[in-house]
Every structure is written in structure tokens, then in C-alpha cells.
Image (spheres, grey):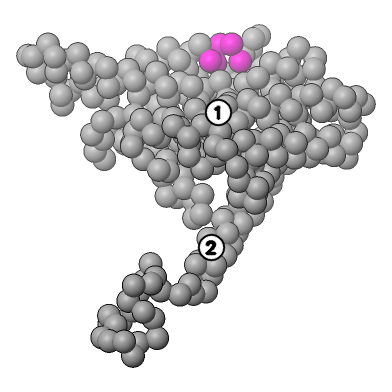
Amino acid sequence: MAALEQDSPPTGPSDSQPQDQPPAPTAALPRRGFRDLTKRALTAAVLLGIALAAVWAGGLIFTLLVFAALALLLWEWADMALPFPDRTDKIVGTVGMTALLAGALLFMLPGILGLGALPNAPLWVFGLGVATAWAASFRLRWPRTLTPGAEQVHASIGDLLNYYKWATWFAPAIVAVLWLRHGHGAELVIWLFIVIWATDIGAYVVGRVVGGPKLAPAISPGKTWSGAVGGLAIATAAGVLAGIALGSPDIAQTAWIALLLAVIGMIGDLAQSAFKRAAGVKDSGSLLPGHGGVFDRLDSLLAALPLYAVLIWAGKSPL
């Protein structure tokens, strides 16, 4: 760290620091830690404001924000899923996949605008989105890597299918959040955001303060069991408090749904950490100061959204 480096090395015994001892600690480390925490908090505050405003506004504003987030997710995913992505690959993959999923989701546009919707629209949207994504995969890597060698062809097919196979994992979450907001209102979406954010914040703070045994050192060395337990406890409490504020008629049901979604969110976080470790990257991107990439912030939410939508569909609402 530059702040801990001296302009010139010690020249003799008259120096204040003996050469066989490490330099005395300075205020640089706590100052840097405070700056990092401040940067992280400011970024989170901005994201929180944008997300809540869009959810509350609903309609086309919310839909456009969802697709913007999808495009950023796919852009970051290309870096992790493709072995040697260049700008052309990333543009084709991101624009193509976003356009295809957006086109599929146009089936929901009448419902989004309050003009009625197709029967079983989420099922149609998900099926068409997955089918078109797999069909489009034959453009991403083949034209520039296809050679007469069977091994090269096999490797190319494996690369492109890996990218699109996992990219379609985003589709259920996108369908779920649009269905929840446009079919059931802003309160349910905001409640889920509160639970997932409380999970992340609680796990981060408790893990840093308490420390202790690692949760999954081979996947994510920074996560601890204390952080996991603290995150689940804080998420459940936050879900209950938000449920009371939003008029939940069954607090016990609100509590177990919050706990379940927090667990699923943590599993999604660990899964994303495994993806990043396999890809050899620390963060999915660098767009968000103090947080990394968009995928780093949305991993838990992406995992929890489909289950949450199923619970609501089955009549198990937290509110």
C-alpha cells in the first residue's frame, strides 16, 4: 500500500524504526477501510433509491429497468462463461440474448399495460425465452471458430452452449419479478427486496464483526458461519417488521417465508461465487463502486425470485 511505503529505505541505526521489525501501523489502513465502507454505502443508497422508485412507479419504467439490468447481467456473464471473449462476442451475446428474451416477454405487454394478458403468460414467456436463446446460440461462437477439426468444433459448441445454458437461468427471475410487480403490486416486490438486502447486509456485518469458522472456504473464503446465521436472523426480523408495517395478517407465515427466501438467497450467492471461482475472477464486473458488478449485487435476488413467485401463486403470501 502506497501509504505504508517510505520514500527511502532506512540508512542506519539512527532511524526510528529498527530494520528487523515491521513498520509501525499507521492510520492509512483504517482510513482506507472507512473509505471502502463509505463507497459501498453510497453505492447501495443510490441503487436502493433507483430500485424503490422504479418498483413504485411500475409500468414501462419498471420494465425498462428490469431489461437494462438483464443486459448488464448478460454482458458480465460473457466474461465468465466464454473462455476468450472479445468485444464482438460480448456485444452479439448480450444484445441478442436481451432482444430475444425481451421479445418473448412482449407476450406480457398487454398485462403490463393493464389491457389483459394471455392465459398462462409466464409459462409461455419462459418457454419461448429459453427456446429462442438456445436457437440464437449458434451465432455466438461458431462463425469465427469453426474449423475442419472435430475437436475444435466440439469445443466451440461446448463454449456457446455453456454460455446460453446458464444465461437462461436469468429468465425465470425476470419473468417472476415482472409477474409479481404487474400482477400483484409494488408491496410484495419491496418486501422481498427488504428481506434479501437484510440478508446480505446482516451476513456482511456479523461476519466481519464476529468472524469464526468459514462457511464454504473452497468457494468463498470470506463467508463465515456466524455471518450466515446473523444474515438469516436479521433477514427474518426485517421481513417480520416489514410485514407488520405493510399489514400482514399472518406474522408466522411472514416469518417462515422470509427465512426460506433468505436461505435460497444465500445459496444463490454461493452458486455465483462458485461460477466466479471457476472463471478465475473475483468480481463479476466493476460497474458498481465498492460492490463489483451487477451480478454480484443481484445473485441472491435472482435465486429467490422464482421460488417467491411460486409461493405467491400457491397462495402463500407474506402480506
Asked whether 189 or 178 is in front, the reply is: 189
Q: Is residue 183 above or below residue 225?
A: above
Q: In this rendering, would 216 be left or right of 139?
A: right
Query: Which label number is shown at residue 33?
Result: 2
Query: Which label number is shown at residue 277?
Result: none
Looking at the rendering, the stretch of residues picked out in magenta corresponds to 122-126
Q: Position of residue 139 (x, y in %)?
A: 26, 22
Q: In this rendering, would 291 be left or right of 182?
A: left
Q: Quadrant of residue 228?
A: top right
Amino acid on which the number 1 mark rests in the picture: Gly
Label 2 sits on a secondary structure element that is helix
Point 75% across, 40% down: residue: 234
Q: Which residue is mark 1?
A: 268
Point 53% across, 15% down: residue: 126
Mark pair 2, 1: CA separation? 27 Å
The quarter in which the N terminus is drawn is bottom left
- Which of pointers 2 and 1 lies earlier in the amino acid sequence? 2
